[in-house]
Image (spheres, grey):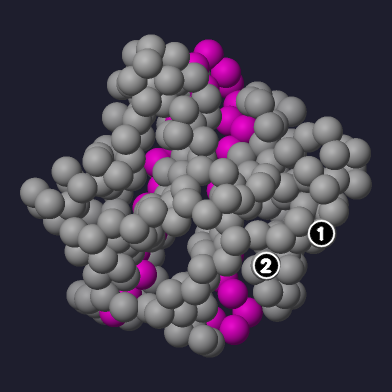
Amino acid sequence: MEIQIAVAKVNKYAVSESGDTLEVIERPTGGLSVVLADGQTSGRGAKAVSMMVVRKVISLIAEGVRDGAAARAASDALFADKAGKVTCTLNIASVDLHSNTIVLTRNNPAPMFICRGEEIEANAEESISLGTSRNLRPIITELTIEAGLTIVIFSDGISHAGERRGTPMDVRHALRSMLEDQEPTPQQLADTLLAEAVRLDDNRPADDISVLVLRVSPRIGDEVRRMTVRLPIHA
């Protein structure tokens, strides 16, 4: 088997800096963690908050701290720094080769979706953003690594897409229509969800949008690890 990770991101319309931050880190006991944070509001202030949270989390994971404890520590740090007046959502998706599991950590009101073939399960248990209080606990889901498993995580720019014109996005329906008719790659899934959210916002995203797709696939090819990143630059 192999793990495939794809990300698609776009800034809020007419805002030069995204309040969403995403980082990938190798785990000290084997595997990878992807950390996605979305700072309150948008722009430079939100970016500073999300970067602070992500850096705190990845530094602790690199030291061998468990994901849930890292999330709680980041929340405590944000609460202390901002006196509870600023919040930040957090998702961690970890492929832990030591336990042979995928660990999903969520402090985000937005749900995430776990797909097995055409079966789509919404993980929508109530979850609170970081920074609202001390000792805030994340929602943790642990899954066995198995071929065909696809996990879709996103910031609230997806959840709120289309709301201003009364046509909110139905993520489950969008996923089902893609998974029933074809076998999209993780990047195609991420790109299609992002494109639909932008379309519902009349091509002027009302918020920063980030989509993360993680899939377990049958292994094809060699033992080389690869990562490709595309970053458009406006000269």
Element carrying mark 2: helix
Mark 2 = which residue? 68
Q: Position of residue 156 (x, y in %)?
A: 51, 36
Whether residue 233 is visible: no
What amino acid is found at the position of numbered circle 1 in the picture?
Answer: Asn
Q: Is residue 21 magenta?
A: yes
What is the spatial separation of the Cα atoms under label 2 and label 1, in whole angstroms?
11 Å
Q: Residue at x 82, y 48 (%)?
A: 133
Question: Which numbered circle lies on residue 135?
Answer: 1
Q: Residue furthest bottom?
A: 98
Judged left or right of residue 163, residue 150 is left
Element type at mark 1: loop
Relative to residue 223, is residue 135 drawn left or right? right
Highlighted magenta segment, given as a residue range: 1-30
Q: Is residue 146 above or below residue 88?
A: below
Placement of the N terminus among the 4 image quadrants: bottom left
In x, y percent, where is residue 105? Answer: 58, 62
Residue for point 41% across, 26% down: 161
Front residue of 212/140: it is 140
The structure residue drawn at horizontal position 65% and vertical position 68%, both measured from the top left corner, is 67
Relative side of 61 to 31, left or right? right
Q: Are marks 2 and 1 in contact (CB under 8 Å)?
A: no
